[in-house]
Image (tube, helix red, strand yellow):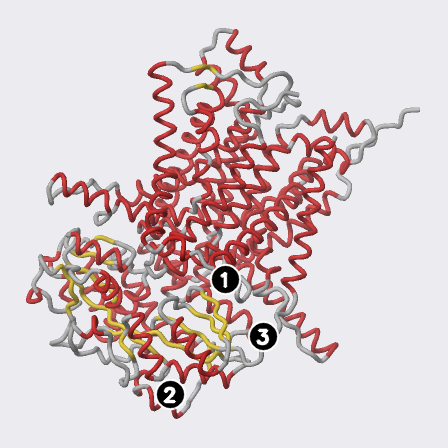
């Protein structure tokens, strides 16, 4: 008998707890005056800059991390009731899609204009997605372009992430914009005919190249910088692709003020701060990214790899070709 | 004068069941209804490029994991309940432990250890020469192996509980009739435990259907992977939802399969009388084989991944990194898990009981739909939750403007209420399946007898079923708790601002390839999951459950 009552009371306590929790959750959060709320699809290396901003201005920052697609859905569903003031996201295509979906508002300030070059108006930080090679097994002379990775000599020697990976989609999108869909598909078919080993992490691709599982691969440069920072003898080096032709593929992460920001003024202040030499230097130091503000210096580890010609294609506009890129990768058999 | 027996009516249980099941079914329905306006171009593209492959891959995955989990889970449960061998006391509860390790944690530790650049192969190359390569088992074998090891505990837990519930009488009769231990198992024990084994297998298969983390880690192309590819790559959530609707069809098929496998053979027992089954003592080589088999499973499914987490945690700085943030994430995780477990099991019990009282068509349909959320990829069901919640919020806001001329904050979207609702939608199946299977082993004669003595349906549940269901209820609570603390996609999308769970913390790090940094929260989640699992095992009686 005792057991029976205990069991039932347990359920009742659970329900009461639930009720209390529901009530607590439903209560509106006390509005901090001036607080900037960020929805962020970028989760690395920005904390020092945010802390510096709060220290400098006294404006508190609240961050909700998430992945891009889901973040967009939440922002859209919340609509004009959203608590978010700033959307911070990686990949130019994502930024383009957010803007097109009406999730961001146009901002303009003299400071942003002064801090950032014209072709990088929203974006705050940059990185390079390029060819990585094993320094003991490959000489730079063997490498040339992204397109040439389809050469049969790389058969079985190539490591790639899946075609579902956003940065590869962006790379293929720029190829599509430049060469047209049919030609881009032929390039990607070349890659997939080399039977690349699919490894779904940049760091793991670099480790695989170092260990000799494959000889070349495509990754973002800052993953290599992290590994080299830990082990200066790490036997992988970047090859700046397409130097004789279109330039190396550059991607960005950037922030925008949301369409229904409650705190537009402070959000703008945050963007201005993020584009300042001070904050850009932090991004360069912590995350090994290339600062978008030319007044900030590149991290020494990255600087050692030298200067290179960038692909000057309008990377944000490549967002328009992202869906086509995904489809042609499917057709080309690139997993 | 004795009262006339009341007719066995379901009373208010039917409307209550509908009131619970219908809102829970809304997100699932919204996914299903997306098929009403098909995105033709995406479907024809998929059909031309990969759909047949994806469907075959998905079916093969689900079948492989189902067979693997059922065979492994049942064999281990049978070994531990019905036999005596060295280490059995330890294995009996330790074999549930893999349940506490989230699949995504398991996948990345597994890969970190066994891939080409990992320590195992590097060591082998050092020994056997640089040209040495471990044969690549391929994505399919890897994914099935990892998921089998991660999900067999569902079957193990339920099968074990069912074996323990069985009285010694039936089995001993079989043995007295000259059946060997194996024959008695096959002819008596197994058929009696079938509903529980099938329920466990269905849970494992639904997990496999909805999983994204493991397939993504190993680059295995399933329909779930296609959902994300279309959503994030083609920015077409509508089409992604439609692919998820296809997954729903698969899940419906699974449930139908489960019902039919459980189906005709309905075995019920009154409360086990007399002592439990006396285990057969294994000797010599057989005992050794049993010990080695259990140890091997435990090693690969639990000790190796957790060992890797410990090594990483120490490498990245160890105890001094256990800061206020980790403690806070732990607290949030436990609170959400506890509340969800209580809520989901209460609702699941109500549904299972209503179904028992009146298995009418509307109740059956509603419970079936409400239990489907488990088989849909988490992110898709999360959007299915988000959209109606946001709609209600906006409607309430408009109402507040009209009546009070002031705005309302978002009451459901991005609040604890919305998140808890999403958890219920996602995990009702776990609570419901477990309790429904438990309830199924209780003889309807007990209900009839109690009702004829004048007890109300509520009183029968409280005074007859709950004591009998104690084990099932504890199991259900532990399962839902563990599922909730591991849950990622819905938590990411729907959590309130400033609320971070351990799973979210792990994800923010692993999404940046910082696995070693995810080790500490990873360990925290494993330990948090261990406690309820172990407590349940203890409370539900170990080798020899207390006699009556």
Say what secondary structure mark 2 lies in. Answer: helix
Residue A112 marker = 2
Tags 2 and 3 both on a single chain: yes
Q: Residue furthest front?
A: B320
Quadrant housing the N terminus of chain A: top right
Say what secondary structure mark 1 lies in. Answer: helix
User: Is residue B205 found left or right of A200 in the rendered image?
Assistant: right
Return the chain for callout 3.
A
x then y, percent, for residue A255: 40, 77
- Whole-Å distance between the Cαs marked 2 and 1? 31 Å
x then y, percent, for residue B84: 45, 19
- Front residue (pair A330, B499): B499
Q: Residue at x 31, y 49 (%)?
A: B218
The answer to which of marks 2 and 3 sits earlier in the sequence is: 3
Please name the residue that numbered disc 1 is placed on: B493
Please name the residue that numbered disc 3 is placed on: A81
């Amino acid at each position: 008998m005792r057991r029976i009552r205990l069991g039932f009371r347990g359920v009742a306590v659970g329900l009461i707890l639930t009720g209390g929790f529901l009530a607590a959750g439903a209560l509106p959060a006390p509005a901090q005056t001036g607080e900037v709320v960020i929805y962020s699809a970028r989760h690395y290396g920005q904390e020092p800059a945010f802390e510096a901003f709060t220290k400098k201005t006294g404006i508190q920052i609240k961050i909700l991390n998430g992945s891009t697609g889901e973040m967009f859905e939440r922002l859209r569903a919340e609509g004009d009731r959203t608590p978010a003031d700033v959307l911070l996201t990686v990949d130019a295509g994502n930024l383009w899609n957010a803007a097109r979906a009406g999730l961001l508002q146009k901002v303009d300030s003299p400071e942003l204009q002064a801090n950032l070059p014209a072709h990088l108006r929203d974006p705050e930080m940059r990185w390079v997605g390029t060819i990585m090679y094993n320094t003991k097994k490959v000489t730079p002379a063997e490498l040339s372009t992204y397109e040439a990775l389809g050469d049969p000599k790389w058969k079985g020697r190539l490591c790639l992430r899946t075609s579902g990976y956003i940065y590869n989609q962006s790379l293929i999108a720029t190829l599509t914009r430049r060469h047209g869909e049919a030609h881009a598909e032929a390039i990607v078919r070349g890659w997939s005919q080399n039977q690349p080993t699919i490894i779904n992490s940049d760091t793991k691709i670099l480790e695989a190249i170092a260990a000799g599982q494959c000889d070349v691969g495509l990754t973002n440069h800052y993953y290599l910088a992290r590994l080299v920072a830990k082990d200066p003898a790490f036997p992988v080096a970047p090859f700046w692709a397409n130097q004789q032709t279109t330039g190396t593929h550059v991607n960005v992460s950037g922030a925008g003020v949301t369409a229904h920001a409650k705190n537009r003024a402070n959000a703008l202040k945050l963007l201005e701060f993020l584009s300042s030499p001070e904050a850009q230097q932090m991004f360069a130091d912590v995350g090994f990214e290339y600062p978008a503000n030319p007044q900030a210096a590149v991290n020494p580890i990255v600087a050692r790899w030298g200067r290179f010609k960038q692909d000057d294609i309008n990377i944000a506009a490549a967002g328009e070709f992202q869906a086509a890129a995904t489809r042609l990768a499917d057709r080309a058999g690139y997993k | 004068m004795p009262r006339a027996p009341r007719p066995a009516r379901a009373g208010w249980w039917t409307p209550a069941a509908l009131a619970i099941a219908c809102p829970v079914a809304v997100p699932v329905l919204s996914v299903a209804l997306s098929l009403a306006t098909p995105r033709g171009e995406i479907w024809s593209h998929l059909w031309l490029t990969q759909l047949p492959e994806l469907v075959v891959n998905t079916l093969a995955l689900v079948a492989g994991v189902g067979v693997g989990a059922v065979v492994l889970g049942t064999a281990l449960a049978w070994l531990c309940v019905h036999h005596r061998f060295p280490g059995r006391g330890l294995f009996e509860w330790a074999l549930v432990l893999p349940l506490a390790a989230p699949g995504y944690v398991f996948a990345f530790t597994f890969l970190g250890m066994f891939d080409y650049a990992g320590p195992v192969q590097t060591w082998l190359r050092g020994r056997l020469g640089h040209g040495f390569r471990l044969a690549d088992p391929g994505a399919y074998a890897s994914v099935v192996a990892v998921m089998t090891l991660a999900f067999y505990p569902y079957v193990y837990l339920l099968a074990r509980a069912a074996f323990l519930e069985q009285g010694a009488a039936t089995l001993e009769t079989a043995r007295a009739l000259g059946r060997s231990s194996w024959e008695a198992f096959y002819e008596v024990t197994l058929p009696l435990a079938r509903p529980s084994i099938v329920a466990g297998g269905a849970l494992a298969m639904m997990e496999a259907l909805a999983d994204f983390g493991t397939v993504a880690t190993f680059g295995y192309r399933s329909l779930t992977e296609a959902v994300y590819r279309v959503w994030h790559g083609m920015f077409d959530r509508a089409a992604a939802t439609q692919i998820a609707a296809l997954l729903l069809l698969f899940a419906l098929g699974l449930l139908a399969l489960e019902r039919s496998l459980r189906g005709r053979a309905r075995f019920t027992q009154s409360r086990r009388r007399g002592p439990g089954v006396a285990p057969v003592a294994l000797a010599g080589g057989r005992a050794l084989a049993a010990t080695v088999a259990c140890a091997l499973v435990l090693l690969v499914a639990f000790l190796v991944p957790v060992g890797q987490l410990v090594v990483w945690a120490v490498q990245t700085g160890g105890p001094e990194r256990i800061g206020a943030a980790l403690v806070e994430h732990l607290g949030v995780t436990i609170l959400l898990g506890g509340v969800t477990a209580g809520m989901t099991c209460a609702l699941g019990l109500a549904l299972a009981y209503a179904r028992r009282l009146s298995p009418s068509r509307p109740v059956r349909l509603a419970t079936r739909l409400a239990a489907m959320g488990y088989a849909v990829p988490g992110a898709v069901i999360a959007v299915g939750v988000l959209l109606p919640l946001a709609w209600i919020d906006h409607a309430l806001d408009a109402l507040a403007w009209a009546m009070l001329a002031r705005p309302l904050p978002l009451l459901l979207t991005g609040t604890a209420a919305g998140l808890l609702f999403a958890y219920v939608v996602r995990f009702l199946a776990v609570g419901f399946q477990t309790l429904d299977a438990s309830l199924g082993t209780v003889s309807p004669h007990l209900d009839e007898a109690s009702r004829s003595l004048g007890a109300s349906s509520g009183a029968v549940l409280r005074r007859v079923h709950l004591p009998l269901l104690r084990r099932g209820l504890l199991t259900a609570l532990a399962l839902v708790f563990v599922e909730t603390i591991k849950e990622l996609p819905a938590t990411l999308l729907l959590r309130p601002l400033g609320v971070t769970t351990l799973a979210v913390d792990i994800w923010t790090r692993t999404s940046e390839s910082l696995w070693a940094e995810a080790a500490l929260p990873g360990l925290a989640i494993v330990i948090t999951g261990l406690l309820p699992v172990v407590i349940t095992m203890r409370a539900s009686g170990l080798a020899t459950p207390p006699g009556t």
